[in-house]
Image (cartoon, grey):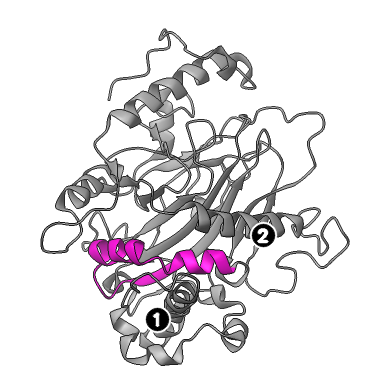
Amino acid sequence: MPKVDVNLPLDDVAALIDFGDDELKMARYKQYGTAQALAMHNRGPITYDPDGALSTEILDAYWREGFYVFENVVGAEERRDIEVDVAELLERAPIAKDASVDKHGRPALGSDCKGRSVRMTRPLSDPLGGTDANHGRHPVKMAEPNAPDEAPEWVMQLLLGTLQHSDACLRLYGHPELLNVAAAVNGPDFTPFNEGLWIKQPRLGSSVAWHQDGWTWWDKPELDSGTHGFNFMMQLYGCDAANGLWVVPGSHTKGKLDISDLASESGSDRLVDAVPLICAPGDVAIVNRQAVHGSFANTSDNTRVSVHFGFHRRKSVYGITSGGIHNPVSHYDDAYIRRRSRMLMYAIDARQQRFPEETCFEYGPLADAKDEFRWTSAARADIRDYNLMDIGI
């Protein structure tokens, strides 16, 4: 992809906001990136070949680019369920970082959990770039536009352990077509990674500095372009160049990259080869965790709510001792993986109760024990702090 032409004409001068001396360059960058993203051949509905396997064209595009946008996956009824849950979760957000109460004086969301739950950030900030957080994988500081005068001191950016907080998100986790994709990409014995709810509120949402996920396999000879798994990202309201994730196509095939060098070559945090995810409401993107990706502060008027959930190959996690970011350092043996994978079984059953007309996904590793994993009040108690057993590699 060529370098961004900063002399491109703009269709929408309203995009020129909030980035100071770089407003014009940022607006042109977003416009150019959007055009490039829409010209790629990596979007469309989930389709299958005549033998019932996921379309070869989809798999080829995913492995070539490192991401794919599945269109029209989640219908309006299910999106409404998720929207109701998200509104309630936002009402229960802590009033500040590390606060134990919400704005109503009630115990805040996640305040009674042992596992990581809510990440609060300063509006339009970059809390990770240029720090040692997450094994130092965010080396480049992103632009931090000035927040509006009326902005709150803190906003919720991320909720982890989402499946214990939202039944609607739990049901989405059991979506049969998405789990078919997971099996096609990572094999029928795929395992969970973790789950999150990302929220970029209009004119408040923080950036996430450029990074590659994963840390366990970079220097191992077994590394290939799928070793560290992938994330699904369901877009509740859609996303665009202003509020969505950006990805460097093909970067998942190049091993561990020096992101500082990429920024230096680009002359700023506007990486020249990156393109944004362009999604409508109900679209679901699959993004390879080894791809270079990140997002800018949301200075637009549009909310982005992304329901994330990731999966690994079993061979990437079995017998490995890892963790330290998403979960405590742990040894991923059969018992650990089976215990964590129960979330898939609960999700499949919860979804069947809500959408009985659907054909359930059959998760092979626990298929012989599916009667043990019915979604009941007892199951709700069983999943408390389940994300302490995330499978981070």
Residue at x-position 78% and y-position 64%:
108
Majority secondary structure of the magenta segment?
helix
Q: Is residue 31 visible?
A: yes
Q: Looking at the rendered structure, which numbered label has been put on residue 101?
A: none
Q: Is residue 265 visible?
A: no
Residue occupied by mark 1: 337
Residue occupied by mark 2: 118
Query: Which percent across, then down, holds residue 41?
Result: 24, 36
- Nearer the N terminus, badge 2 or badge 1? 2
227 or 183: nearer the viewer: 183
**Snapshot quadrant of residue 265:** top left
**Snapshot quadrant of residue 249:** top left
Query: Which percent across, then down, holds residue 328?
Result: 54, 73
Specify start and end residues of the magenta stretch as a single range. 167-193
What distance separates the C-alpha of mark 2 from that of mark 1? Answer: 25 Å
Residue at x-position 42% and y-position 42%:
293
**Snapshot quadrant of residue 83:** bottom right
Residue at x-position 37% and y-position 65%:
311
Of the residues shown, which amino acid type is indicated by label 1? Ile
217 or 185: nearer the viewer: 185
Query: Which percent across, then down, holds residue 66?
Result: 29, 46
